[in-house]
Image (tube, helix red, strand yellow):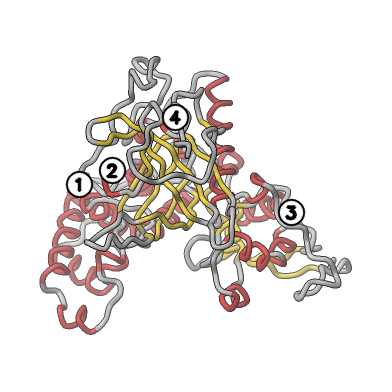
């Protein structure tokens, strides 16, 4: 995410100390630059003075090459991306210079090994802007822009980055199938085309068995694979019979994006981290679980990387947060999330610890999104996205005026859907109102720990027992 929302990039290495050399001031000749789109395609630019060119200047060239209208210019941003780290850049940033600091950024914001860091190299990507509201995205008419947004959403669905239920990924897969091969294919041709393209082209890898292997090959179309194929073709037939006339070019693109908008983490920036596992067995062995943390204009979502489901989803009005630095050797950066919960029928404050070197980035992004939200609410009343109301009604609306401990907001929904929170599976620290501790766990912070909050304080301070 945008690094200097929370302290800035580290200073550029001096000429004598950098192992990668210095930025040559004489680099003014035209050079080739590849700006990658999500997927395998790229925009080829010839740029003069590449060492000093800014994101804002590059943006004009990329929009011109892609024929993006001015009305949609805010929908996209430049990112530096690699398997180890993803950062959205600001218009003033100079990508060439930041690429030269990439190893410094990896040491600062990842747990990667020295060998991995030395071999990692970022690419410059042009993709969706985290700060672009979904409501504005729905107003876009340009087919090329919708295609770019669709390509990115599809990659996130297939990679399992957007957890969704079977009916959702089946519907999205059928739409992709229809866009790629057209509607109206008879059963025989549709089946043959699907088997040629393979399920992994249309369904998430963890669902379609994208890992391959001998067992997957021997199983062929039997069992689960056959069921997935049948369901996808059935959904495709429904799409083919919906209208007697060929669909408009943007119809399926809009339908795909609209379905993705119903997922609360669409449009998020993603960060890697770990959370504590609940103690298990007679020896009470614990450990940590790898998670993805998605942060958008609406809230924070913690997702299980392995199981591909949501562990916790909170609107900004439903949480307090802070970031703590390591206090001793072996300690971690921690993003703390506090939210309302329940323990044996007793209302409590719950604390979730997210261990991550990117906690500083996450905290800075939350703060920036909260400021944007507050500014929007302070001006003209804005229309809330109806398709994002999967979690709770935002605080401050009718019925929530006395939402303290005596008038609590609704519980987090606990359903079988992968989109809904699974608070009962989390290893959290719980406190009651009067400061009495329920679990024998304490944060390494003072009682005034939480100084950041999306709304005017509605929580009791986190009380730490003395002695």
Question: Can residue 248 be seen?
Answer: no
Residue designated by label 2? 420
From mark 1 to mark 2, how far is it between C-alphas?
7 Å
What residue sits 32% from the left and 48% below the top?
426
Question: Can residue 230 be seen?
Answer: yes
Residue designated by label 4? 317
Chain-order first, disc 3 or disc 4 = 3
- Foreground pick, 293 / 243: 293
Residue designated by label 1? 416
From mark 1 to mark 4, how far is it between C-alphas?
24 Å
What secondary structure is marked by label 2? loop
Left or right side of 140 for 124: right
- Percent from the top left, x then y, of residue 267? 46, 46
What residue sits 17% from the left and 60% below the top?
233
- Percent from the top left, x then y, of residue 388? 36, 35
Residue designated by label 3? 54
From mark 2 to mark 3, how far is it between C-alphas?
41 Å
């Amino acid at each position: 995410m945008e690094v200097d929302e929370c302290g800035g990039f580290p200073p550029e290495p001096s000429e004598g100390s950098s192992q990668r050399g210095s930025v040559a001031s004489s680099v003014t000749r035209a050079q080739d630059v590849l700006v990658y789109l999500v997927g395998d395609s790229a925009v080829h630019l010839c740029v003069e003075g590449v060492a000093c060119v800014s994101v804002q200047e590059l943006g004009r060239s990329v929009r011109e090459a892609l024929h993006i209208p001015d009305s949609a210019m805010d929908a996209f941003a430049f990112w530096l991306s690699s398997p180890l780290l993803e950062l959205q850049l600001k218009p003033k940033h100079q990508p060439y210079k930041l690429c030269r600091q990439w190893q410094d950024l990896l040491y600062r914001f990842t747990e990667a090994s020295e060998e991995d860091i030395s071999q990692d190299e970022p690419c410059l990507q042009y993709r969706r802007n985290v700060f672009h509201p979904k409501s504005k995205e729905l107003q876009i008419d340009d087919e090329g822009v919708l295609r770019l947004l669709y390509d990115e959403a599809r990659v996130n669905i297939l990679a399992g980055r957007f957890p969704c239920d079977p009916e959702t990924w089946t519907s999205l897969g059928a739409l992709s199938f229809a866009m790629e091969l057209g509607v109206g294919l008879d059963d025989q041709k549709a089946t043959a085309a699907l088997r040629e393209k393979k399920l992994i082209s249309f369904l998430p890898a963890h669902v379609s068995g994208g890992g391959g292997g001998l067992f997957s090959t021997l199983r062929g179309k039997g069992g689960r694979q056959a069921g997935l194929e049948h369901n996808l073709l059935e959904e495709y037939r429904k799409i083919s019979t919906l209208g007697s006339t060929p669909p408009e070019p943007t119809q399926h693109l809009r339908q795909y994006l609209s379905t993705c908008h119903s997922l609360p983490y669409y449009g998020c920036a993603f960060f890697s981290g770990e959370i504590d596992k609940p103690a298990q067995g007679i020896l009470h062995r614990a450990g940590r679980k790898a998670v993805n943390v998605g942060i958008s204009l609406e809230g924070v979502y913690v997702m299980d990387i392995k199981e591909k489901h949501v562990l916790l989803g909170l609107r900004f009005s439903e949480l307090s947060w802070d970031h703590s630095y390591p206090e001793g050797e072996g300690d971690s950066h921690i993003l703390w999330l506090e939210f309302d919960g329940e323990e044996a029928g007793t209302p409590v404050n719950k604390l979730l610890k997210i261990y991550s070197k990117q906690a500083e980035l996450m905290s800075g992004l939350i703060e920036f999104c909260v400021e944007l939200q507050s500014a929007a609410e302070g001006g003209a009343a804005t229309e809330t996205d109806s398709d994002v109301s999967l979690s709770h009604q935002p605080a401050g609306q009718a019925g929530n005026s006395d939402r303290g401990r005596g008038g609590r907001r609704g519980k987090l929904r606990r359903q079988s859907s992968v989109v809904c929170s699974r608070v009962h599976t989390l290893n959290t620290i719980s406190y009651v109102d009067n400061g009495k501790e329920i679990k024998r766990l304490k944060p390494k912070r003072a009682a005034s720990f939480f100084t950041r909050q999306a709304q005017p304080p509605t929580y009791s301070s986190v009380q730490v027992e003395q002695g």
